[in-house]
Image (cartoon, rainbow, N blue to C red):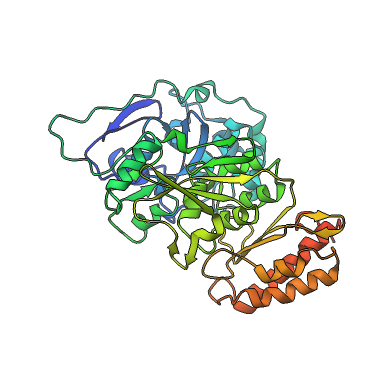
Amino acid sequence: MNTSFLLNAEPVTVAGLSPTTTLLDWLRDTRGLTGTKEGCNEGDCGACTVMVTDEHGAAPLNACILFLPQLDGKHVTTVEGLSTSDGALHPVQDAMITHHGSQCGFCTPGFIMSMATAHLNGETDYDTALAGNLCRCTGYAPIVRAAKAAAALPVPPRLFSLAENIPGEQPEAAGAAPPSSHHPRTSDNLAALYAANPDATLIAGATDVGLWVTKQLRDLDTPIFLNQCADLRGVTDVPDDWRIGAATTIAEVEQFFTPLFPGLGTLLRRYGSAQVRAAATLGGNIANGSPIGDGSPAMIALGATLHLRHGATRRTLPVEDFFLAYGKQNRRPGEFVEAITIPKQEDTLHCFKISKRFDQDISAVCACLNLPVRDGFFAGVRLAFGGMAGTPARASGAEAAMEGRPVTRETIDAAMAALALDFSPMSDMRASAPYRMQTAQNMLLRAFHTLDGALTDVHEVQA
């Protein structure tokens, strides 16, 4: 399949390349656009950030783990495309110069693209917008000053219409070789394709799969790209549930559910970076089965249901039953995650994440604690943890110690003791087993103090 998109307002069609060619490599090697830098090549440093615009709006994305077929029908803007044809700089470029926001300059194009996207979208939380861009010499203070200075300046009008005039899908040449990748446009098409090719690799956001290519140098057999399956994306409000399409991005989940479950929003705000959240999907986060994937504990605590599909056959199961052992999920060959449903409920969710860095880091322990209280007693408790075992899992013993018991410190102490029997965590580079256990127990205590009205967030507590 040919891939057609706009690059800095110029229509381009790419054909004949491997479907796992990254946008970063193509920009630098084929187009000579070397402003987009390669730093980590795994989506952590942000030096490769570009702006990608489609019907959902503009988002910053990491070009190093973005495969070309994911760009079909979109508009890509690189740092070379921000200034006008007469050389006039974008407001954030001008502000970076004025406020001395660049020293060595290697990271600067990525910062510029994150700042320009935030400027276009009216975002002024720069701690969040710039968390995915690493700078080791300038320091963030002058960069943030530049972002704030540019915020009051108007967005260049041409950036509001980036998604217009994108070329449509281009036909394959007559006699072309069989496709090296597949691009279904509906979940029905996907179901048929995947059932016929059960060894294929499904690619949604590529924030995980991308590293298989850039770091592990793997050749992916028969990639199936999901970015054209519009019916797999979005949150639907149905009578008793919220239905989340598997290809809904973490950023979209965060936006929808933060007003309903602020604790979930706080957790998802720390999921990777803005660039990662704009690409990664909730279905992919669950389907990869990572024991430290932050989406799964939250879904388990909320009593979510997973919807799986193989061809025309569908089945459902609780999210916690999807994880069988480390690296092993309850998913059959050719079966994929179609949706996740969350039962409608009052907000009693507390989500806590412990990692070495506050931003853009993998959890050592993630706790999502659903603590409904009725007449002073715990009722319907669900405690889910990531990082405490080979899979995300519920703490059944701690739940039993709390269920039907009064909301007191004594109940919490009993649950903390029971938690030591629920899990036998491992030691690794992120945390030792004793640290993980003590941290998990302290999260229960933190939730209790939160219920009691205490300020427990690090951004709330002051000396």
In the rendered image, which quarter is residue 237 located in?
top right
In the rendered image, which quarter is residue 42 located in?
bottom left
Q: Is residue 2 left or right of residue 320?
A: left
Q: Where is residue 223 in the image (x, y as percent from the top left)?
A: 31, 47
Query: Could you say which is closer to the camera, residue 297 or residue 314?
Result: 314
Q: Where is residue 110 in the image (x, y as percent from the top left)?
A: 49, 44
Count of numbered badges drawn on the protein: 0
Q: Where is residue 195 in the image (x, y as percent from the top left)?
A: 31, 47
Q: Is residue 224 left or right of residue 381?
A: left
Q: Is residue 397 left or right of residue 432?
A: right
81 is higher (above) or lower (below) than 17: above
Residue 136 at least partly seen: no
Q: Where is residue 221 in the image (x, y as percent from the top left)?
A: 27, 52
Query: Could you say which is closer to the camera, residue 134 or residue 402?
Result: 402
Residue 297 at least partly seen: yes
Viewport quadrant of the C terminus = bottom right
At x 58%, y 75%, the residue is 425
Query: Could you say which is closer to the camera, residue 369 or residue 121?
Result: 369
289 is higher (above) or lower (below) than 175: below
Q: In this view, does 218 lie to the left or right of 53?
A: left
Viewport quadrant of the N terminus = top left
At x 50%, y 62%, the residue is 323
In the rendered image, which quarter is residue 398 located in?
bottom right
